[in-house]
């Protein structure tokens, strides 16, 4: 985790006034809490905070937080943004140790898509869960949960029981074998088949009506003769 570092300054003043003053100074106020220690007010350089927010896996990535000569492991837990400008207003970090067990959402990723017969036939990958909530040690948070699509066919469903998880990582939902993804038939193909069926039904109706009219005309002609 050494490359994932955040440098912060410790804050003595707290409250709305102090937070506004920090923002005017070009920093984002925040707090570090947890691990049975008192909360510690901090401030993060605005440019550094903007860079962190570009990380799609921000909330499941462990960082080494540097405050002066002190270092500690933290996990970003919440970032408050301005509702109009999306400027970061406040950030919360959870203080952790390698033995801390946490509950966290981990993103789902898909591998071996080229080995899926369903996708080769144009199937739609219907992702039911983009993230899976798991429980694990802070030092063992996976970057993602990989779902292998090798050999999947149209109509298949992949449930959590078929997804291998790293040692020590367990889903928080244990009372059912929930669905992670399904592979549905191609939408365009289904529409084309429906249109073909409707066209055939229409032709059958037209042919039947013409036949009945022709029979009626023949009967009328017979009566006239």
Image (cartoon, rainbow, N blue to C red):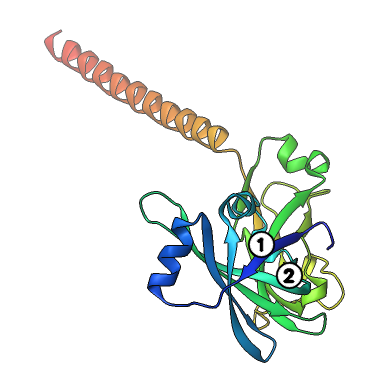
Q: Position of residue 116 (x, y in %)?
A: 79, 43
Q: Position of residue 115 (x, y in %)?
A: 83, 42
Within 10 Å of disc 2 (Cα), the crowding (few <14, some 14-19, many 20+) is few
| Nearer to the camera, 25 or 156 | 25
Label 2 residue SS: loop
| Nearer to the camera, 158 or 53 | 53
Residue farthest toward the right in the current orientation of the protein: 167
26 vs 112, left or right, is left
Residue farthest toward the bottom in the current orientation of the protein: 36
| Nearer to the camera, 156 or 18 | 18
Say above or below: 49 vs 221. below
Q: Which residue is denoted by mark 1 in the rendering? A: 180
146 vs 20, left or right, is right
Q: Which residue is denoted by mark 2 in the rendering? A: 68
When asked about the image quadrant of residue 60, the answer is bottom right
Q: Quadrant of the C terminus?
A: top left
For image coordinates 41% across by 64% down, the residue present is 20
| Nearer to the camera, 181 or 54 | 54
Instruction: Check residue 44 in the rendering and tell me which mark sits there, or answer none.
Output: none
Q: Earlier in the sequence, mark 2 or mark 1?
A: 2
For image coordinates 42% across by 31% down, the residue present is 198
For image coordinates 59% across by 53% down, the residue present is 53
């Amino acid at each position: 985790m050494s490359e994932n570092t955040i440098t912060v300054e410790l804050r003595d003043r707290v409250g709305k006034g102090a937070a506004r003053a920090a923002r005017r100074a070009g920093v984002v106020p925040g707090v570090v809490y947890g691990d049975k220690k008192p909360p510690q007010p901090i401030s993060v350089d605005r440019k550094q905070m903007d860079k962190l927010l570009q990380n799609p896996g921000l909330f499941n990535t462990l960082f080494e937080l540097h405050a002066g000569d002190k270092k500690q492991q933290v996990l970003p837990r919440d970032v408050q943004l301005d509702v109009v400008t999306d400027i970061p207003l406040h950030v919360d970090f959870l203080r952790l140790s390698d033995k801390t067990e946490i509950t966290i959402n981990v993103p789902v990723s898909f591998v071996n898509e080229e080995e899926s017969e369903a996708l080769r036939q144009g199937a739609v990958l219907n992702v039911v869960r983009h993230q899976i909530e798991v429980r694990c040690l802070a030092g063992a948070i996976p970057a993602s949960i990989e779902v292998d699509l090798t050999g999947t066919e149209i109509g298949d469903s992949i449930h959590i029981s078929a997804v291998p998880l790293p040692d020590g990582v367990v889903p928080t939902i244990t009372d059912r074998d929930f669905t992670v993804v399904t592979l549905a038939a191609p939408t365009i193909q289904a529409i084309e088949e429906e249109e073909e069926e409707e066209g055939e039904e229409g032709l059958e109706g037209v042919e039947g009506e013409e036949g009945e009219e022709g029979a009626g005309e023949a009967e009328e002609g017979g009566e006239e003769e």
